[in-house]
Amino acid sequence: QSALTQPPSASGSPGQSVAISCTGTSNDVGGYNYVSWYQHHPGKAPKLIIFEVSNRPSGVPDRFSASKSGNTASLTVSGLQAEDEADYYCASYADSNIWVFGGGTTLTVL
Amino acid sequence: QVQLVQSGAVVKKTGASVKVSCKVSGYTITDYYMHWVRQAPGQGLEWMGRINPKNGDTDFGHKFQVGVTMTRDTSINTAYMELRKLRSDDTAVYYCARLNDYNAFDLWGQGTMVTVSS
């Protein structure tokens, strides 16, 4: 099972919006609505920010939104803030009780 | 308090084994699947496998179908991940993570650094 494909890096200025893509196949992203997104600051545990493609857990700002089209999921961070600078990972259920993560995207707030 | 607390950092020799523990607090371990994820230095998150704490059934990523064992002790609400025949490229931070009812990893341990050296 190959990792989902994410751009290695993304950037934006404070207040701007940035989108991060996550491309898989019909066996994972395209086949199930079990795509989730995680924010990971170095040295800390990853934090769930989106579940089931587009849902935010309680406490996650609505600046974080996500969607899916075909085999590609996308995370959008609007109104960028300095604390949004982190690594972002997508994850998806794949066939046969397997899960897969994306390669990760480092978001830089300029 | 709902949390996962992992065992501490370890240094192992090549070829040795390591067993990482993940203590569940605030809920009953049998209520949710427990997954294990690792992150090698400079690399991304990598899914290793999962255990159903109710019956001990496991599933593994292709890369981890040999050399990895996942177990649990429900009497002490603790999950374990053992990695055998360690190689240098097993050097990584290992996380346990709970999969919730919405098929997302909503609770993570603090991570355990495993360093493998010759």
Image (spheres, helix red, strand yellow):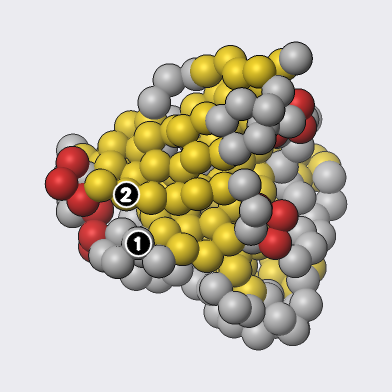
Residue A45, above or below A92 = above
- Element class at badge 2: strand
Residue at x 59%, y 78% (from the top left corner):
A96
Kindly indicate whether the residue at mark 2 contacts the one at mark 1 (C-beta within 8 angstroms): yes
Residue A62 placed where, x, y %? 48, 56
Give the residue type at disc 2: Arg
The image quadrant where one finds the N terminus of chain A is bottom right
Residue B31, above or below B87 = below
Please tell me how many numbered marks the rendered image carries: 2
Instruction: For label 2, count other residues whose C-alpha is less than 10 Å away and answer few (under 14), some (14-19) or many (20+).
Output: many
Residue B74 placed where, x, y %? 21, 51
The residue marked by circle 1 belongs to what chain? Answer: B
Question: Quadrant of the rendered structure where residue A33 is?
Answer: bottom right
For marks 1 and 2 on the same chain, the one whose residue lies earlier in the sequence = 1
The numbered disc on residue B56 is 1
The numbered disc on residue A31 is none
Residue at x 46%, y 33% (from the top left corner):
B19
The residue marked by circle 2 belongs to what chain? Answer: B
For label 2, the residue is: B72
Q: Is residue B5 toward the left or the right of residue B115 in the image?
A: left
Residue at x 66%, y 35% (from the top left corner):
B85
Residue at x 68%, y 75% (from the top left corner):
A29
Residue B37 placed where, x, y %? 56, 46
Residue A77, above or below A39 = below
Question: Quadrant of the rendered structure where residue B30 is?
Answer: bottom left
Instruction: For label 1, count other residues whose C-alpha is less than 10 Å away and answer few (under 14), some (14-19) or many (20+).
Output: some
Give the residue type at disc 1: Gly
Residue B58 placed where, x, y %? 46, 63
Q: Is residue A97 toward the left or the right of residue A88 in the image?
A: left
